[in-house]
Image (cartoon, rainbow, N blue to C red):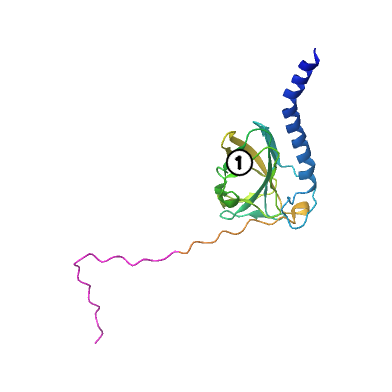
Amino acid sequence: MSRSSHGADHWRATPGRLFIAAVAALVPALAGCEAGVNAPTQQWHVPTDGAGLVLHRIAIRNVFVLGAPANSALAAGKSAGLFLALVDGGSPDQLLSISAPGTAKSVQLPGGGPVSLTQGSPVFLTGPQPKVVLTGLLHSLTGGSFIRVIMNFQNAGSVPLSVPVVPQAQYYSTFSPAPTPTPTASTTRKPKRARGATPTPTPSSS
């Protein structure tokens, strides 16, 4: 093999190697610091047993739902925080939405979404404050259970994941629970009177 041919093969292999290196660099960062890069103080934890995969050169790492404290459950109707990290090793993409069929009415992305992904710029949605929130839980969530989550990307498409519910205990006791949804105030409107109708007189007591 000529030197020029060897150089061409090396050039073709380099992007893949860079992506692998980026993912490898991301793993210890997530394992050591679950708090994320934007936290006021770094809080150190052991790595979570969160879900993860690599699809279309997008690495999805350490996805988990923060549950209630040990020996308790998040009740139906409440909210739950979803934590994860993303690293893009290819073309730019966007996380358009996330859904949790059968578990939550909706999932809120930071800023209302979408979340932009560019090569070499990992996105940490890892806490300790939840940036992705499952709202309107359809049933109670207990630690140790799993829920189905679907992540929808603009280019990579839909990615289903089986995500664990981690109790808010031990290493995760410093994570903040999702905010309680604010009840919507209901107003009672008086029925409109038909045009031309005569109001019924109120009987007076003698």
Does 71 sit left or right of 134 as displayed? right
Task: Please name the predominant secondary structure of the magenta segment in the image.
Answer: loop
Q: Residue furthest top?
A: 1
Where's residue 85, x and y in %? Answer: 69, 43
Where's residue 154, x and y in %? Answer: 56, 37
Residue 51 location, quadrant? top right
Where's residue 144, x and y in %? Answer: 70, 45
Q: Which contiguous range is marked in magenta?
A: 186-206
Label 1 belongs to which residue? Answer: 149
Q: Is residue 47 visible?
A: no
Residue in the image at 77% along x and 57% along y: 41
Where's residue 159, x and y in %? Answer: 60, 35
Q: In which quadrant will I find the C terminus?
A: bottom left
Amino acid at the residue labelled 1? Val
Q: Is residue 90 visible?
A: yes
Residue in the image at 72% along x and 29% along y: 15
Residue in the image at 21% along x and 65% along y: 195
Q: Is residue 111 magenta?
A: no
Does 138 sit left or right of 117 as displayed? left
Please tell me whether mark 1 sits on a helix, a strand or a loop.
Answer: strand
Q: Is residue 201 magenta?
A: yes
